[in-house]
Amino acid sequence: MHAVALGGGHGLHATLSALRRITPDVTAVVTVADDGGSSGRLRRELGLLPPGDLRQALAALAAAEDGGTLWADVFQHRFGGSGALTGHAVGNLLLAGLFEVLGDPVAGLDEARRLLGISGRVLPMSAEPLEIEAEVTGLENGEVSRIRGQVAVASTPGRVRRITLHNPGRPGRPPVACREAVDAVLSADVVLLGPGSWFTSVLPHLLVPDLHDALVRTPATRVVVLNLVPQPGETAGFSPERHLDVLFEHAPRLRVDAVIADRDSVPTPARLRRAAAALGGRAHLARVAAPGETGRHDPDALADCVREALGIPASGREGQ
């Protein structure tokens, strides 16, 4: 079974960890709008794709390969000290070097996965760095403000209403999808969207025209995985069904087959079931949160819930 997961950061890490328990044929399609930390520095200084979320996806797939390797640990190592390398992850620097030497981020990511010995694949949603712009309320006199940049959107004290996606290198033109990412979605058996930062990691995939069209047209089973808790700024005060409403507002043509949510995170299951049905799907509620870890999914439990949504026999874990 060919599985494709779209997202970024820790949310995508959770999805990839779960999917690797179901199939070895996993492709990650990763957001490329990060402008903070080590990724932001490399993006500004070298004009390359921000490598951090791409590195995290590679690390998630590497960790699933017989416990990972020394190279996987080195890839995630972050330099300390107080010099120019402070805060940079080794994997970020390695990816930046591969992107420059090969002149192609897809080729660079394929070389990195060979180095790490993983069978899955990691692809950017676009081969060019993109920028998020958000309409936000609550910042000044009740008016709608516009803010730019992933870090600014993720940390805003206001309420995000809507986002758009821009290509700073080609002003006025729509973002161009990575062709390999589009092909992966169209050839998939199952596509997972979420969990993760809703406005900065999940929704951006729907704003790249060719990728959006692929998600609409794919014959794959489309599964949305909801977050365990709302996020300050981005989704503060959101109910589980409000996440689906926002998804529909940004992609009215998109239909889903299943919506996965943690049973203990859904105060009104009937409302979520109605919201999922409005998108063409069915809500699957189970205990998928990692015990004792706020906001983190348990990959085994999430894998079992994905199996249920796909009609595949569960692994036999208790507590669903």
Image (spheres, rainbow, N blue to C red):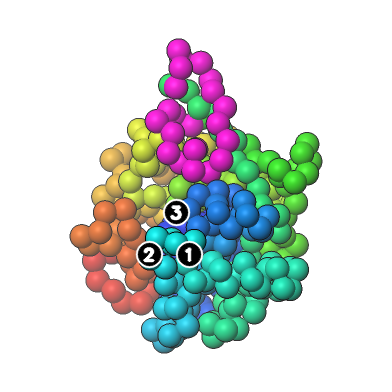
Q: Which residue is mark 2?
A: 81
CB within 8 Å, label 1 to label 2: yes
- In this rendering, does residue 184 appear at all? no
Distance from the alpha carbon under mark 3 to that under mark 1 = 31 Å
Q: At 51% across and 16% down in the image, what residue appears?
A: 143
Query: x, y percentage for residue 85?
Result: 48, 64
- The CA distance from mark 3 to mark 2 is 33 Å
What's under tag 3, amino acid-wise? Answer: Pro
Residue 81 in percent (x, y) is at 37, 64
Element on which disc 3 rests: loop
Tag 3–tag 2 contact (CB < 8 Å): no
Label 1: which secondary element = loop
Q: Pointer 3: what residue?
A: 195
Mark number displayed over residue 85: 1
> Could you say where residue 79 lies in the image, as x and y percent from the top left?
42, 68
Picture quadrant of residue 304: bottom left
Q: Is residue 154 magenta?
A: yes
Image position of 159 with respect to 209: above or below:
above
Kindly identify the amino acid type of the residue bearing the numbered disc 2.
Answer: Gly
| Disc with the residue nearer the chain's start (3 vs 1) | 1
